[in-house]
Amino acid sequence: MGTWGTGLYGGDFAADLRTTARAVLRLPLDADRLVQILAETEPGAARNPEDEDYTTFWLVVADQFARHGLKSAQVVETALRIIASGQDLDVRRRLGQSAAGLKKRSVALAELNDRIVAAPSGVARKVLREPQKFVMNVGDIFSYPTCGGQCRNPYVLNLDRLKIYGQSGGQVWRRDGWGAVVIVARGLTFGYLAWYRPLVLGQASETQVDMASLRTAQWHLEPPGTCSQTHFGRIGLTRIGTTALDETKLLAEFGALAPGDAQAIADISIANSLNVRSRRPGRSVQREQRAVRIGDLGD
């Protein structure tokens, strides 16, 4: 269960589930299908009443549905039963919650009960009209500018306010090198939320990279991330070529690649995976993965 407090979102599990629920509720599906998807993300908590996170799962889902105007008989009935029976308080009592904490939790549950009962239905919610469009293909190779090995922060619009940090403190971001990335996998979480898996150049180049040098350079597999069209532009990604990747060789080199579902749900930008080693002192990026060559991964 991790750390937890007395509020509905006072614990790790509840906070993480809220993030998941907010992503799932963007899908243009009916309430019952959304419940099914959420249950599939946490099958133990959703389906096993003996699981210590069971009550939290249904209470959080009920709260998120109520706040978004969604009605599900299963969610309403389960949450109200958990509150009325004292099941949630019993779980917390067994886990060592203090008497004062249980009293505060009771107040939070009473408020949630009222919110569920009074929740309007049919409230318009902001949903995706269609699956997010891919902005990169598997095998695409992109270059992008770096400063001290760091790519542009796509959440900062004004580059004059964009800074990097190191031994000398915050400095304005100014291009002093180039990085490169190859997309080795991509997918749609829940059939709607796009993510990408990058193979990143091991060290920034002082000059613009070219295909000939990249095929023999050292690369490292990095965690997946999302990339909207806006972030694509702000990072400064420029397609410079493509390479044919052999799925058998990828599997032999890296094993089965886990999908980027967690990153898609939390909307973690691919920018977090694009920082590279730099020749500038004090700005080294440590890589645990061994280096590979993209020329060894092709057909």
Image (cartoon, grey):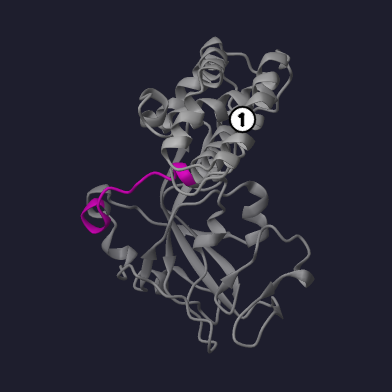
Residue 275, given in percent of the width and then of the height, sits at 52, 69
Residue 240, given in percent of the width and then of the height, sits at 52, 61
Residue 155, given in percent of the width and then of the height, sits at 69, 57
**Left or right of 71: which side holds 33?**
left
Is residue 285 depicted above or below 140 in this figure? below
The quadrant in which the N terminus is found is top left
Could you tell me which residue is drawn at 52 percent across and 45 percent down?
Answer: 4
The quadrant in which the C terminus is found is bottom left
269 and 262: which one is in front? Answer: 262
- Residue 297 shows up from this direction: yes
Local SS, label 1: helix
Could you tell me which residue is drawn at 62 percent across and 81 percent down?
Answer: 176
Q: Magenta stretch?
A: 251-262
The residue most toward the top is 73
49 and 132: which one is in front? Answer: 49
**Left or right of 108: which side holds 205?**
left
Could you tell me which residue is drawn at 42 percent across and 73 percent down?
Answer: 202
Question: Mark 1: few, some, or many residues within 10 Å (few <14, many ≥20)?
Answer: some
Is residue 164 depicted above or below 268 in this figure? below
Is residue 260 within the magenta segment?
yes
Is residue 126 within the magenta segment?
no
- Residue 30 shows up from this direction: no
Could you tell me which residue is drawn at 66 percent across and 18 percent down?
Answer: 116
Q: Which residue, given by chain and number where applicable, does mark 1 sit on? A: 106
